[in-house]
Amino acid sequence: MKKGSNNKMSNCNTCPSNSKCGEENKNKCSKLIPRFGNIKHIIGVMSGKGGVGKSTITGTLAIKLAHKGYKVGVLDGDITGPSMPRFFGINTKRANIAQVEGTQDVKFSTVNTKLGVKVISLNLLTEKEEQPVIWRGPVITGVLTQMYSDTQWGELDYLLIDMPPGTGDIALTIMQEVPLEGIVIVSTPQDMVSMIVKKVVIMAEKMNINIIGAVENLSYVKCEKCGEKIRLFSKKSAREQAAYLGLPLLAELPMDLELADSMEDGNVEDYICNSVDYNTLIENFMDSLNKNR
């Protein structure tokens, strides 16, 4: 992968955070902007721990936004464990890498889903999706910023960044260099998980990043016969867990076997578009986002 340009902020008009910046901040701003597109809102999806369904929440939000008519992109920021191509059922496709005319720089094309969501992931750039990347931190963060800056996004209303778990190099790079409008925190109903996720919340607060709210995933199993919610991991309610994090609750989502089947069958967009279980998530997400603008 050839090195792209280090495209620091040169035109505030194309920055999603423009309306919130004072003139002093604008003069000192060093945020990265995409070279081949215009993005109105950039949202990160984070968790302190892996295995909580962060990528699923990223994909679900992207599908619901696209279903509402918005132009949506997804950046798979989990470089060493990318999963967005599998989620959308586009893992057999490959993104193109082309040289920018008259330069040594490159640009990436997205792979578009059936609903029109534009996706870029390292798994779409490697020859085989099982091929591991055995890189140290500086290389990983360099590739991430390049995929963000040098992808042909076109005009987007929303770019969602599926971030790796934890508070390491990639999370820090995204918070420092990408003009995030806010982040969504994903957790599951266990005290140990909530404690680890709290670290991400505190990190975001220290970095002055707006937190849109929390999603409690894998919250319960719904009985097929009576509809009762059976909680397997904790007797505490999702609101209690969100209160511990100090965040508004966007949604509590069940363990959904049909969702898993739809991903394996490549029909996840149809399933999520038609499922009412995910309506609360997108409604509360939009409400919380609008309140903070």
Image (cartoon, helix red, strand yellow):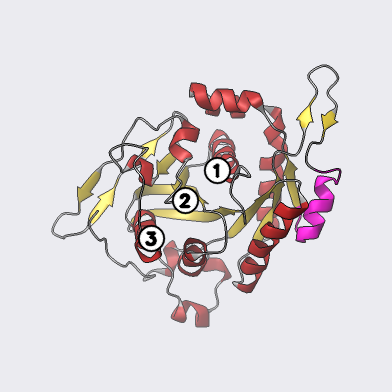
Where is residue 42 shown, x and y percent of the image? 51, 55
Q: Residues within 10 Å of mark 2 (few under 14, many from 20)?
A: many
Q: Amino acid at mark 3?
A: Thr
Using the numbered discs, state the Cα–Cα distance from disc 3 to disc 1 in whole angstroms: 19 Å
Q: Quadrant of residue 290?
A: bottom right
- Residue 21, compared with residue 110, is above or below; it is below
Residue assigned mark 3 = 145
Tell whether 161 sits left or right of 150: right
Tags 2 and 1 touching, CB below 8 Å: yes
Quick one: 206 or 47, which is closer to the camera? 47
What is the residue that sits farthest to the top in this orientation?
225
Q: Residues within 10 Å of mark 1 (few under 14, many from 20)?
A: many
* Residue 78, numbered label: 2
Using the numbered discs, state the Cα–Cα distance from disc 2 to disc 3 in whole angstroms: 12 Å
**Of the image marks 3 and 1, the number of the one nearer the N terminus:** 1
Q: Secondary structure at mark 3?
A: helix
- Residue 89, compared with residue 142, is above or below; it is above
**Picture quarter with the C terminus:** bottom right
Residue assigned mark 1 = 55
What is the residue that sits farthest to the bottom in this orientation?
24
